[in-house]
Amino acid sequence: MYKLILLDDEEIVIKGMQKVFHFADFGFEVAGTYSNPVQAMQQLEEIRPDLIITDVRMPLMDGLEFAHKAKVMLPDVEIVILSGYDDFSYAQTAIKIGVSDYLLKPIKKKDFQKMLRQMYQRIEDKIKQVSYMETMQRFADTSYRKIFAEKEEQAQDGSKSTFGGIRNENLSKSILMAIAYIQDHLQENISLAEVAEHINISKNYLSDLFRKELDVTFVNFVTHLRIEKAKHYLAETDMKMYEISSAVGYPDSAYFSTLFKKHTGKTLSEFRRQH
């Protein structure tokens, strides 16, 4: 259940909404009802609602001012404004503030129900997106550690690292999506153009992002991930060498063997014996 608060200076309106609409059926629990916007504002940070439904005309603070302050306090909260005034300027202001929906009174039951379903889906999608981005960030952080470990090891033995320093640990959404796609398609013959098309940006722009945010070329980044994946297979499975080669995107096992030794200083067999 997602948390919802209702705000209207007429308590009869709030009671009416609760009587007509069974909010739990739409995935919401009513965490608070208020006829005083100032009091509601004081409780926002403690309740941290996912959805606010508020009237627009209220004493002390109108719905637009309340929405603006609520968005400053809780940027991700969804806000729906109910208004008896068909005034385009109100709607324009609401859009600028970041209000999710603006419904005119008298509100039809089906329209209100539709709004609740839409708000539930928006919240669901947002949470899934945040979860996805956090997962990708953890994956990226793991890659950073491996890259830094490689760089430190190579610095100690005087060799040159394949990777430069990472300039920006707060990766863009495009880079995180690219990394996720690469990770899911390592065994395929993926290209910069294919990944760029998948995330809807140009290949030149994606190439620039890899250099600016990771300080590495696309090809070297993919190669690094494939080598790391191969290390995992060698150490943790009984897969044959040609099977590992194919599983990490190299159908030519002889070529992969040469590439692996170039990057690790060990043959596939040597690495497996040592791990």
Image (tube, rainbow, N blue to C red):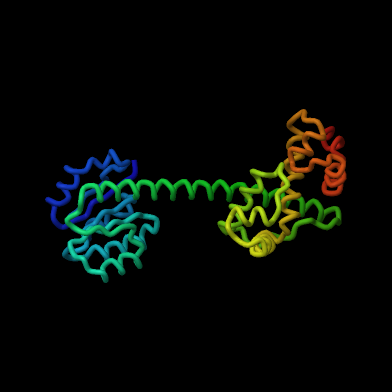
> Tag count in the figure?
0
Query: Is 98 placed left or right of 153 in the picture?
Result: left
Among the 4 quarters of the image, the one containing residue 70: bottom left
Among the 4 quarters of the image, the one containing residue 231: top right
Position in image of residue 62 (x %, y %): 22, 65
- Residue at image location 36% in from the left, 55% down from the top: 77
Residue furthest top as drawn: 238
Who is closer to the viewer here, 178 or 134?
A: 178
Whether residue 272 is situated above or below residue 35 in the rendered picture: above
Whether residue 178 is situated above or below residue 230 in the rendered picture: below
Who is closer to the viewer here, 16 or 195?
A: 195
Who is closer to the viewer here, 187 or 39?
A: 187
Position in image of residue 19 (x %, y %): 16, 42
- Residue at image location 65% in from the left, 45% down from the top: 183
Position in image of residue 89 (x %, y %): 26, 71
Quarter of the picture containing the N terminus is top left
- Residue at image location 73% in from the left, 41% down from the top: 229
Position in image of residue 12 (x %, y %): 12, 50
- Residue at image location 34% in from the left, 57% down from the top: 100
Quarter of the picture containing the C terminus is top right
Query: Is 223 placed left or right of 178 in the picture?
Result: right
Query: Is 138 placed left or right of 10 in the picture?
Result: right
